[in-house]
Amino acid sequence: MKGIAVGMSMLHCLNQPFSSLLRRLETLERTDVELIDDGWHTLDRDRIRQLLEIGRSRRLRFSVHAPFISLNIASPVDAMRDFFLKRLQKSIKAARLLECTLMVIHPGMRTGLSPLFPGLDWQTNLESTRKVLSAAEDCGVKITVENCPSKYGFLLSSVEEFRRFFDELGEDVDLAFDVGHSNLNEQTLALIEAFGEKIVHIHAHDNDGVDDTHAAVGCGSLDWKLLAENVKNVGFKGTMIVESYSGIEESMRTLRSVFS
């Protein structure tokens, strides 16, 4: 399909040292790469310098997935939420130094206190998102919000939730469409139909419709041919990032074949 670039997320090696990530990048050429600013791969100035050197020599184009491990921008605890927002601001600055134009963030999550404070996490998620967007605008970084599985407590999973989110946010923000997550909520085609014009980035991985296994493309219950038809129909021209835990190269080949 003309206009679609296929790349890879470095999620598959997040359990390995940063040096392993660098060696992996040195095997690539002219590829879109999504870096994970979290865990053992947390970005700092020295790592950014190394990434820029490899990126320029191998002609890689980076995007950044913001920190997400134990991070909840809808936390009802002010001090914790302030800490999370400062961490995201640091990640945005790292993306700017890496010359990235796009960053993916997760929406906020419900907590055990959510039933006691109806609607608080929703409003807090809106307020936090606005602050992230403001910080990103100052750095020239585009924020995209990812749809995440409702079974794990995320606030934004369905068409109805995203429609309300976009209506109430009062800011322009696009969707990082995760097809594995949408498969868990049976929302794949519905999200494409409802928000096709807002989808600028796609995470591609598979699962059985029950657990978020991040399986290789074609190793789960997703109908990739039907997905491709619908993605083509909305004129998607962004980047499709393989976010599987294994079978990365095979998944990339499958996507290029299905979307050709």
Image (cartoon, helix red, strand yellow):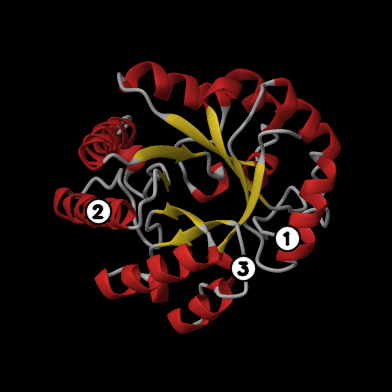
Query: Looking at the rendering, which quadrant does residue 224 occupy?
Result: top right
Position of the N terminus, as image quadrant, is top right
Q: Label 1, on which residue?
A: 215
Q: CA distance from mark 1 to mark 2?
A: 31 Å
Query: Image point 35% across, 57% down: which residue?
Result: 98
Q: CA distance from mark 2 to mark 3?
A: 25 Å
Secondary structure found at label 1: loop
Q: Label 3, on which residue?
A: 28
Q: Looking at the picture, which amino acid does disc 2 mark?
A: Lys
Count the numbered circles shown.
3
Secondary structure found at label 2: helix
Q: Earlier in the sequence, mark 1 or mark 3?
A: 3
Q: Position of residue 71 (x, y in %)?
A: 34, 56
The answer to whether the residues at label 2 and label 3 have Cβ atoms under 8 Å apart is: no
Position of the C terminus, as image quadrant, is top right
Q: Nearer the viewer, mark 2 or mark 3?
A: 3
Farthest residue in the left direction? 79
Q: Earlier in the sequence, mark 1 or mark 2?
A: 2
Q: Does 43 appear above or below 202? A: below
Q: Looking at the picture, which amino acid does disc 3 mark?
A: Leu
Farthest residue in the top direction? 167
Q: Position of residue 196 (x, y in %)?
A: 60, 23
Q: Label 2, on which residue?
A: 93
Query: Image point 80% across, 56% down: which residue?
Result: 253
Q: Residues within 10 Å of mark 1 (few under 14, many from 20)?
A: many
Q: Does 205 appear above or below 155? A: below
